[in-house]
Amino acid sequence: MVKCDYCGTEIEGLPYRCKYCGGTFCVWHHLPEEHDCPGLHKAVSTYALERAERLERAATPTRLRGAPAAVFYPGEARDLAIGVAAVALAYLYPYSLAGALLALLVALTAYLPHELAHKLAAQRYGYAARYVLSRWGLLLTLLSALPFAPLRFIVPGYVLVSGYAFGKREDGVISAVGPAINLAVAALALSAAPVSRIAGELVYANAFIAALNLLPLGPLDGRKVASWKPLLWLFMFLAAVALLIISV
């Protein structure tokens, strides 16, 4: 009597022969997935295989040369460029070549380091992190570029951290590094602010972004930092406000 190649059970009646691997199986193991068929991939359509390969490539992060810790996902550099451009538009004044260059400098030294700090800190802890655009945040940022806009909203995107649930300390550190970078840049630029308009703009922009993000509200960095270390949050927030007042 014929036996099942998978479980060894004697087969009563006609056996099932797998058309992918050629084995003989019982009624319980006749399907390719039931007997760990080595030719199981042949049962999937070519289109499905190609689609799965494309999705796998799209989800695979790429490493930048010379920066082994900086893992960027496909499309992330584009989103970062759009976010930086939106911030530059929000700071575009006066409307001239010099104003455009200054606005771009502000975005590159205030917004970009802030977001990259969040991303790299999360990856340092082993979490997947990528910068993504926010539809409504991008719209608010672009509206801030209008001449009559009373306030600037610098929220074109954010760093999305995914993985297992992390503790309060990790969440606090990841959230604190962004504003900390802004405070450091503002403090460095402060010494040259009295004699340089560019330095003054850098102080203001970095202090503003730090103060805005340190508000202890909703998904902002301030709520997570305050939950982790209230005194650290208070020090950072007061420092941001002080730098903002000095730069006005």
Image (cartoon, rainbow, N blue to C red):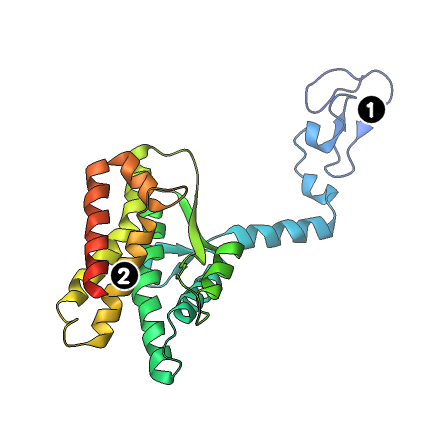
Residue bearing the label numbered 1: 15
Dot label at residue 120: none
Mark 1 or 2, nearer chain start: 1
At 37% from the left and 76% from the top, the residue drawn is 93
Dot label at residue 206: 2
Amino acid type shown at disc 1:
Pro
Q: Is residue 170 left or right of residue 184?
A: right
Q: Position of residue 35 (x, y in %)?
A: 68, 28
At 48% from the left and 64% from the top, the residue drawn is 143
Q: Position of residue 153 (x, y in %)?
A: 41, 59
Asked whether residue 56 is in view, the answer is: yes
Instruction: Quadrant for residue 183, please give it.
Output: bottom left
Of the 4 image quadrants, the one containing the C terminus is bottom left
Q: Is residue 75 left or right of residue 29?
A: left
Amino acid type shown at disc 2:
Asn
Q: Position of residue 247 (x, y in %)?
A: 21, 65
